[in-house]
């Protein structure tokens, strides 16, 4: 069965700049997808990895600085990247325009509630320490990265 999410029907999380598109329950476990807009200099995610999921990045506009393993790269509009499971990665806007990115995670656990939890953190309504307690639930495991720290 096809899945169509009209832009007017997608859930938008204003504080975090995330638009929820399709989650694993709607895709029979195949994928979860969202779009994010990052203000200049805004960190999108600190270093983390997914034990089960591959994460695909497609830059719709602007540029995105990405840590993948121990490498720092810059993705520009039209660039596509796949980060395999168990690979540390992080990302943030690069340059002065906003970065707009389509994300797709395959073989992923349901993630929309994770993004809603992050929205609470962005709004100051949720203690960021709560995120660390959800690593297994959302397959989002935070890691240390000297490369990212020293960027």
Image: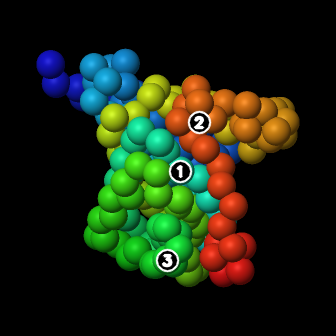
Earlier sequence position, callout 3 versus callout 2:
3
- What separation in Å lies between label 3 and label 1 (alpha carbons)? 14 Å
Label 3: few (<14), some (14–19) or many (≥20) C-alpha neighbours in 10 Å = few
Residue, far left: 1
State the SS at label 1: strand
In the depicted structure, whether residue 83 falls above or below residue 65: above
Position of 8 with respect to 65 (left or right) is: left
Front position in the image: 90 or 8: 90
Report the disc number at residue 115: 2
Q: Circle 3 sits on which residue?
A: 71
Label 1: few (<14), some (14–19) or many (≥20) C-alpha neighbours in 10 Å = many
When asked about the image quadrant of residue 24, the answer is top left
When asked about the image quadrant of residue 21, the answer is top left
State the SS at label 2: helix
Find out whether the residues at labels 3 and 2 contact each other: C-beta distance under 8 Å: no
Position of 6 with respect to 53 (left or right) is: left
In the depicted structure, whether residue 75 falls above or below residue 45: below
Earlier sequence position, callout 3 versus callout 1:
1
x and y percentages locating residue 150 in the rendered image: 71, 80
Q: Quadrant of the N terminus?
A: top left
Q: Quadrant of the C terminus?
A: bottom right
- What separation in Å lies between label 1 and label 2 (alpha carbons)? 16 Å
Position of 123 with respect to 2 (left or right) is: right
Front position in the image: 92 or 16: 92
Earlier sequence position, callout 1 versus callout 2:
1
Q: Residue at x 59, y 53 (%)?
A: 48
Q: Circle 1 sits on which residue?
A: 49
State the SS at label 3: strand
Residue mark closest to the camera, 3 vs 2: 3
Label 2: few (<14), some (14–19) or many (≥20) C-alpha neighbours in 10 Å = some
């Amino acid at each position: 069965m096809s899945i169509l999410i009209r832009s007017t029907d997608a859930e938008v999380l204003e504080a975090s700049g995330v638009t929820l598109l399709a989650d694993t329950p709607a895709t029979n476990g195949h994928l979860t997808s969202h779009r994010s807009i990052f203000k200049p200099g805004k960190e999108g995610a600190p270093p983390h990895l997914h034990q089960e999921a591959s994460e695909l990045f497609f830059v719709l506009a602007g540029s995105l600085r990405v840590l993948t393993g121990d490498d720092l790269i810059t993705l520009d509009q039209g660039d596509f990247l796949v980060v395999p499971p168990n690979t540390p990665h992080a990302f943030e806007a690069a340059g002065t325009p906003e970065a707009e990115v389509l994300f797709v995670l395959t073989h992923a656990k349901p993630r929309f509630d994770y993004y809603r939890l992050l929205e609470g953190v962005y709004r100051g309504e949720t203690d960021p320490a709560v995120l660390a307690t959800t690593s297994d639930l959302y397959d989002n495991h935070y890691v240390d990265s000297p490369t990212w720290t020293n960027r």
